[in-house]
């Protein structure tokens, strides 16, 4: 079945005479509201509803400051989060969060069960299969080996095992920032879509920690666990401050004079800004549906602080293009980069040339995604000082980083 869940879940429940309906809760504002309506409908029809919290390791209700307020800063949030995990048997705990039973639950008797027509069920199954086939044949994963995230539960488990058993996790601390290496878990789509459980991921990290022979490796595993905590931090932020979905946490940003030039936005989206590290990253996104974290930070900073384009346009484009597109993490990442979020030290401007020199020092990442520049010397590639004869049609930089960031600072001073 394909369509509006508010209408269809109740119909399907009726069709198969479902006594109980189980699902995992979602934390996004639209889904919370949708599930509330569905629950009410099902309860009215005298069915039982059980929901579980499977999306996060720690129930957001228990992560509060000593004043019972939500955390706004990652550091203290992380300390509380890890403390709760260490004190509880989180790894195996998937406790039912809500259990609602209508007052007079009647159940389905044998006679009623026998009345369910096989043709109805077959219709459902055939429809469902057709829908899944359509989805698979149109989806971006198909025959696309460029995307490091793989679809399905068994593939997600393989990815986790690869990351843990081959020891990739043990060198995560240093290698995670180098976009030309395959040094991160690539589990973001699986975690976002739910094809892997966050408890399985946590257990994997604990297993590696028990086997890690030295402090560097233990630190690496802890660094990775801190990334899982970032995911939960942003989800908690969205639960506690649902308005984040609509705009900046720091309201003064509503007055910022964005320039929003459509031709610059177009160049950014298509990897044609003339700044190789930015274009390589945007082309990775375009061709694979995924982008390395370091590069997400570089291109986000560039859109906001060099091109002076409203970060919400970047957020939207990421959501449309990423296979791991996730409202909370994406919004959190963009607000962090734009300096409009909860970050206590928000004002940072990335210099794309310095970022390239530091994290792609041999130019391997740039050469992979911008093949027309593969012959250019590494220093010229990193600084974007490429002469016309060597450009092969690749554009000149559309902006001057120094000039643009001074305009940005001036505009920012107007809203301070
Ligand atoms: C502007 C911007 C937009 C982003 N949009 C998304 C998004 O839509 N969906 C998404 O899942 N991540 C997003 N991120 C976070 C991060 O870039 C990805 O989670 C990460 O690159 C995924 O690669 P991985 O699975 O190999 O991560 P690993 O490095 O192996 O980390 C393990 C897991 O931790 C979580 N994680 C890691 N880093 C972060 C982070 N900074 N914030 C939140 N969770 C994190 C992810 O679930 C990830 O799979 C965004 C970051 C920025 C700066």
Image (cartoon, rainbow, N blue to C red):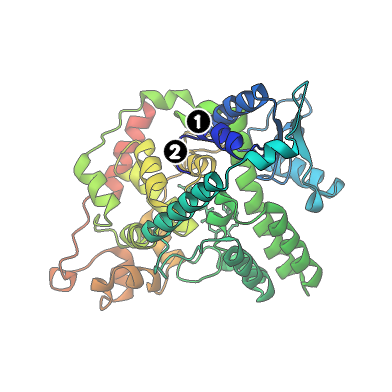
Residue at figure coordinates x 37%, y 72% from the top left: 363
Is residue 54 found left or right of 328 in the rendered image?
Answer: right
Residue 264 location (% of width, % of height): 23, 45
Determine the secondary structure under disc 2. Answer: loop
Between 183 and 62, which is closer to the camera in this rendering? 62
Which quadrant would residue 282 be assigned to in this image?
bottom left
Q: Which residue is denoted by mark 2 in the rendering?
A: 3
Is mark 1 in CB contact (under 8 Å) with mark 2?
A: yes
Between 41 and 197, which is closer to the camera in this rendering? 41
Residue at figure coordinates x 61%, y 41% from the top left: 116
Looking at the picture, does residue 355 appear above or below residue 116?
below
Q: Which residue is denoted by mark 1 in the rendering?
A: 7
**Quarter of the rendering occupied by the C terminus:** top left
Between 196 and 380, which is closer to the camera in this rendering? 196
Residue at figure coordinates x 70%, y 41% from the top left: 53
Between 360 and 228, which is closer to the camera in this rendering? 228
Residue 231 location (% of width, % of height): 60, 46
Q: Residues within 10 Å of mark 2 (few under 14, many from 20)?
A: few
What number of labels is visible?
A: 2
Which quadrant would residue 37 be assigned to in this image?
top right
Residue 7 location (% of width, % of height): 50, 30
Whole-angstrom CA distance, mark 1 to mark 2, is 8 Å
């Amino acid at each position: 079945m394909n369509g509006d869940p508010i209408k269809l879940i109740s119909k399907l429940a009726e069709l198969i005479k479902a006594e109980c309906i189980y699902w995992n809760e979602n934390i996004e504002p639209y889904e919370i509201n949708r599930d509330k309506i569905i629950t009410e409908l099902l309860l009215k029809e005298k069915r039982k509803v059980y929901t579980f919290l499977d999306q996060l390791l720690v129930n957001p209700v228990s992560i509060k400051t000593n004043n019972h307020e939500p955390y706004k800063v990652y550091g203290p949030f992380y300390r509380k989060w890890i403390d709760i995990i260490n004190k509880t048997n989180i790894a195996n705990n998937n406790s039912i969060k809500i259990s609602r039973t209508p007052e007079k639950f009647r159940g389905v008797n044998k006679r009623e069960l026998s009345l369910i027509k096989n043709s109805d069920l077959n219709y459902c199954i055939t429809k469902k299969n057709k829908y899944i086939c359509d989805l698979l044949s149109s989806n971006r994963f198909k025959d696309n080996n460029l995307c490091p995230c793989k679809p399905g539960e068994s593939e997600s488990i393989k990815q986790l095992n690869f990351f843990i058993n081959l020891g990739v996790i043990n060198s995560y601390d240093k290698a995670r920032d180098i976009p030309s290496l395959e040094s991160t878990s690539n589990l973001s789509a699986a975690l976002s879509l739910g094809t892997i459980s966050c408890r399985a991921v946590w257990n994997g990290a604990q297993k590696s920690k028990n086997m890690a022979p030295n402090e560097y490796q233990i630190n690496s595993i802890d660094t990775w666990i801190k990334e899982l905590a970032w995911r939960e931090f942003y989800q908690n932020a969205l639960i506690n401050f649902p308005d984040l979905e609509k705009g900046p946490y720091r309201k003064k940003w509503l007055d910022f004079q964005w320039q929003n030039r459509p031709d610059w936005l177009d160049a950014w989206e298509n990897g044609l800004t003339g700044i190789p590290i930015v274009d390589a990253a945007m082309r990775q996104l375009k061709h694979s549906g995924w982008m390395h974290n370091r590069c997400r930070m570089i291109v986000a900073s560039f859109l906001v602080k060099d091109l002076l384009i409203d970060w919400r346009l970047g957020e939207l484009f990421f959501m449309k293009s990423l296979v791991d597109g996730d409202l909370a993490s994406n919004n959190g990442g963009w607000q962090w980069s734009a300096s409009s979020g909860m970050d206590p030290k928000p004002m940072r401007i990335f210099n794309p040339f310095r970022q390239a020199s530091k994290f792609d020092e041999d130019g391997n990442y740039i050469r992979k995604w911008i093949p027309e520049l593969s012959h250019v010397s590494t220093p010229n590639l990193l600084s974007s000082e490429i002469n016309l004869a060597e450009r092969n049609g690749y554009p000149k930089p559309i902006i001057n980083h120094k000039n643009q960031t001074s305009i940005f600072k001036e505009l920012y001073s107007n809203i301070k």
